[in-house]
Image (cartoon, rainbow, N blue to C red):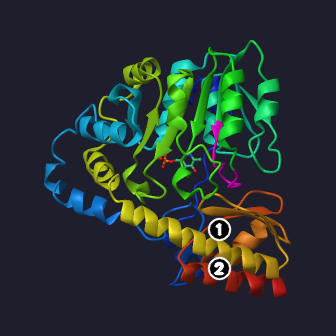
């Protein structure tokens, strides 16, 4: 007899991560593989972060600071909020999880886009909540439609800005209008994992300023993307002290490991690296736009480090064929796929193989 899990867990599907480089090398017997599937930083980690953790490798026999005190203080200073408004976590993914555990009761409704981070959907189901799916409009979170979808059962609304996988944003005015129309007993969770890549000046880059007026807002950010610390697992939430306290009660006592705390604290000051990544991303996107135009491919202009592209054949086939040539991208079913912007050399390799594939 097998032991049964809670019923809501039986129906959940496993998360499919981007295929690891080593696996593709083995599968197709090739030596050179590039991964443009998981929006990882093509320039690696922040050098300041790497330097900082070198001094702490011998300290991993000790527990980390349970309160991530220093990291919290640095973040508070950087974003002009109080330390008690910040919760560092084991990747921003952990925050999505904690929010679901803390707030979603059976049959509560959680509003989210149809094409967005899948974790919002999974964590809602995990807590027996009901995902209420609002289709994207022009590939962007449709805030007006989300407002009209609010019922007396709505508990949470999950926004992703820029949206993964489509790379689109909603602007500051739209966000403010949205916040002012959401009842205060509904949580608004805004995932800003890619905020540092945004070019558009109308983006709410200082969204923390809304916190003084809207204590139902939770902003989620991460060191995974522009700081290049995906492997260390470090993200953070910014919200009202009340919400942060609730999440603190249920998180694991040592949720952020020692090296992650050290690296992130150092990375905050690495403005030079952030700038370098930002500039490389802009160079990459303008090159890729040009190439997609030449190939006559439909795509969505991005404010992030990845582009949403319409393949001329099934995206899974495109993905498999590119893998055979050593390029890993992320198919999304139907014809659309997502490709991360890499180094110029990686972008050129991807385009070279894509052109070869579509010529056939
Ligand atoms: C990458 C990503 C995350 C996960 O970030 P971690 O900090 O690595 O957990 C969360 N949300 C979005 C939209 C992402 O693209």
At horizontal 85% and vertical 77% (from top left) the residue drawn is 296
State which quarter of the image contains the C terminus: bottom right
**Circle on res. 213:** none
Q: Quadrant of residue 81?
A: top left
Across and down, in percent, residue 124 comes to 64, 29
Q: Which secondary structure is most common in the magenta stretch? A: loop
At horizontal 66% and vertical 74% (from top left) the residue drawn is 286
For residue 332, above or below residue 204: below
Q: Are marks 1 and 2 in contact (CB under 8 Å)?
A: yes
Left or right side of 271 for 307: right
Tell me where the magenta segment starts and ends, as one range: 159-168
**Circle on res. 329:** 1
How crowded pointer 1 is (Cα within 10 Å; few <14, some 14-19, many 20+) is rated as many
For residue 351, above or below residue 224: below
State which quarter of the image contains the N terminus: top right
**Circle on res. 350:** 2
Label 1 SS = loop
Across and down, in percent, residue 60 comes to 19, 48
Q: Quadrant of residue 119?
A: top right
Left or right side of 335 for 131: left
Across and down, in percent, residue 76 comes to 35, 36
């Amino acid at each position: 007899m097998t032991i049964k899990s809670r019923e809501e867990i039986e129906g959940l599907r496993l998360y499919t991560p981007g295929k690891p480089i080593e696996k593709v090398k083995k599968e197709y017997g090739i030596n050179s593989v590039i991964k443009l599937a998981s929006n990882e930083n093509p320039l690696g980690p922040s050098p300041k972060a790497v330097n900082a953790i070198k001094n702490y490798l011998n300290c991993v026999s000790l527990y980390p600071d349970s309160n991530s005190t220093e990291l919290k203080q640095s973040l508070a200073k950087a974003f002009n909020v109080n330390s008690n408004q910040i919760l560092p976590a084991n990747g921003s993914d952990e925050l999505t999880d904690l929010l679901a555990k803390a707030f979603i009761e059976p049959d509560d409704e959680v509003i989210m886009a149809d094409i967005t981070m899948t974790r919002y959907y999974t964590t809602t189901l995990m807590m027996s909540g009901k995902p209420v799916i609002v289709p994207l409009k022009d590939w962007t979170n449709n805030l007006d439609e989300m407002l009209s979808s609010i019922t007396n059962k709505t508990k949470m609304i999950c926004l992703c800005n820029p949206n993964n996988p489509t790379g689109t944003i909603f602007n500051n005015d739209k966000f403010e209008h949205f916040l002012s129309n959401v009842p205060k007993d509904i949580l608004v969770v805004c995932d800003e994992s890619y905020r540092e890549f945004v070019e558009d000046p109308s983006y709410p880059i200082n969204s923390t300023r809304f916190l003084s007026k809207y204590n139902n807002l939770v902003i989620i950010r991460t060191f995974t993307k522009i700081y290049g610390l995906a492997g260390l697992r470090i993200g953070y939430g910014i919200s009202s002290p009340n919400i942060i306290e609730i999440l603190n009660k249920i998180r694991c006592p040592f949720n952020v490991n020692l090296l992650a705390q050290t690296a992130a604290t150092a990375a905050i000051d690495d403005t030079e690296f952030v700038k370098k990544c930002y500039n490389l991303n802009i160079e990459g996107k303008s090159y890729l736009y040009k190439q997609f135009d030449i190939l006559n491919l439909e795509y969505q202009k991005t404010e992030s480090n990845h582009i949403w592209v319409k393949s001329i054949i099934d995206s899974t086939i495109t993905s498999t064929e590119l893998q055979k040539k050593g390029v890993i991208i992320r198919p999304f079913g139907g014809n659309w796929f997502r490709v991360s912007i890499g180094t110029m050399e990686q972008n050129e390799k991807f385009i070279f193989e894509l052109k070869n594939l579509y010529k056939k």
